[in-house]
Image: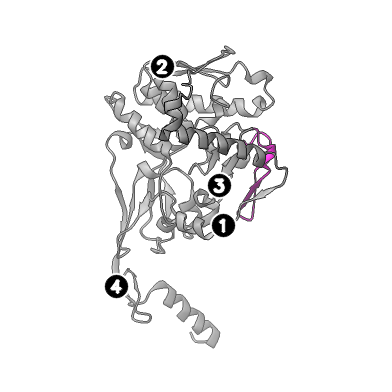
Amino acid sequence: MSLLTLDVSKCVHTSNKFAICNKCVEVCPVETIKIDENIVSFIPNDCVGCGGCDAVCPTSAYDLDDFKAIDFVFTFLENNLEILSCKSELPCIVALSVEELLSLALISPNNIIADIGACKDCSIGTKNLPLIENRIEEVNFLLEALEQDKKIALEELNSEIELTQDALSRRKLLSKEGLKKVVSIKEQLDNEVLASDDALKVHTVTTKDIIKIKQKSIPDRRGLLLMAMKRSKIPEVYHTIDIDNISFISQKDLDEDTCTNCQMCYRICPTGALSSDAKGSVINFNPLSCVQCHSCHDVCEPNSLTKRESFSLASFYEPQIETLVRFTIKRCDECGLPFAYRGGEMMCDRCRVEEEEAHELWGIK
C-alpha cells in the first residue's frame, strides 16, 4: 500500500490564509483530502495511491513513498516505451501532470499512447478518467501550438508492461547504491504500518516548515519541462494562446496606479516567480517560475495584480524576466521607514491611514 505524505512547507495554505487553492480536494477520487481553515487533513488508510493530488498540486506538495513521477519519466524514456499504462510502475495515468506528459511527448522519439483500457473496471476510473482525458487534450493542444509533429493518443489496450529491474548482486548490495536500496525497502515496510492507520492525519506547521517556506523553489517537473523544451525543435512562429488553454504557468500584469507596494505578492510567492530588489523599488516577474497557484492574487488587496489573458509560448524558448512596476523610494517623515513615493506629502500609506483614523476619532476635519 502506498503512503501519501504532505510537505506542509510547500502547501500554499501554510503561508497564505487567503489561499483559495483546493485542487487536491477536487481531484481526490475517494474524497479523503479536506481543507478546513487552511489546515489540510486526510486519512492515510483511505488513500488509494493514485497520485492525482500530487500531479495537480501547483507546488507538488504531496508525495507517494513508492512512486516518483520524474523517476518514472526517465525510466519510461530509458526503456524506449510507447505505452502509458497503470499495469506498470505507474499507479494511474492521473499521477502524471500536464508538464510531465508534455515532457514525455517532447523527448520521446515515439508517439505515446495512453492506455485507458482498465479505467472502465477501476473503482476510481469514473473520477480519474475525465482528468486524464482533459490533461491529454491540453498536452495535444500545446504540442500543436508548439508546432511539434507529435501527439498522445488515448486507446483502450489493457496492455501489460514490465520494466526490467536489476537484481541486487552481492557487490551492489554492499555498495552505497545497494545500501540506499535496502534503506528504501525498510522505509516502505515502515510506511506500510503507517498507511494502515485509520486515524485522521491533521497537518500542522512546525518550526522546520517555517524555515523551509523561505527557501523558495520550483517543482522538479518544471525543470524537466524546460529540459524537454531545449531538446525539442524550435517552432517557426512563437504562438500566443488563451490563458484558459494552459493550466500550469501564466504571465502577469500589474496596475501601478493602484499597487501600494505592500510587498505581499512576492513575499507570499512559493517559487520566487515574483521578486524585488533590496530596496523594494521594483516588482519583477519570471514566468518560467510561475506555477499558477494563484496565491499572489489571493493576497493582493487592491487587485492590482492580474493574469494576462494570453500566454506567449516564446517564454519557453526565450525566457525573460519582466519588470511589472518600478517605485521611487523615499523615507516617511513620520515613521522614517522607506515607502513608495507618488508625490505629495512624504508620508507612507500606514502613517496616512493612522492619521486619518486619529482625525476621525478626535473629530478633526
Q: Earlier in the sequence, mark 4 or mark 3?
A: 3
Under mark 1, the amino acid is Val
Q: Earlier in the sequence, mark 3 or mark 1?
A: 3
The answer to which quarter of the image holds residue 290 is top left
Q: Earlier in the sequence, mark 1 or mark 2?
A: 2
Q: How dense is the environment of label 4, judged by Cα within 10 Å: few (below 14), some, or many (20 and up)? A: some
Reading the image, the residue beneath label 4 is: 330
Q: Earlier in the sequence, mark 2 or mark 4?
A: 2
Marks 4 & 1, CB-CB < 8 Å contact = no
Q: Nearer the viewer, mark 2 or mark 3?
A: 2
The answer to which quarter of the image holds residue 355 is bottom left
Indicate the position of residue 273 as horizontal and vertical percent values. Answer: 38, 49
Q: How dense is the environment of label 2, judged by Cα within 10 Å: few (below 14), some, or many (20 and up)? A: few
Reading the image, the residue beneath label 3 is: 21
From mark 2 to mark 3, how far is it between C-alphas? 36 Å
Indicate the position of residue 197 as horizontal and vertical percent values. Answer: 70, 42
Marks 1 & 2, CB-CB < 8 Å contact = no
Q: Earlier in the sequence, mark 4 or mark 1?
A: 1
Q: Nearer the viewer, mark 4 or mark 1?
A: 1
Position of 314 compared to 365: left or right? left
Q: Secondary structure at mark 3?
A: loop
**Measuring 39% from the left and 18% from the top, which residue is drawn there?**
150
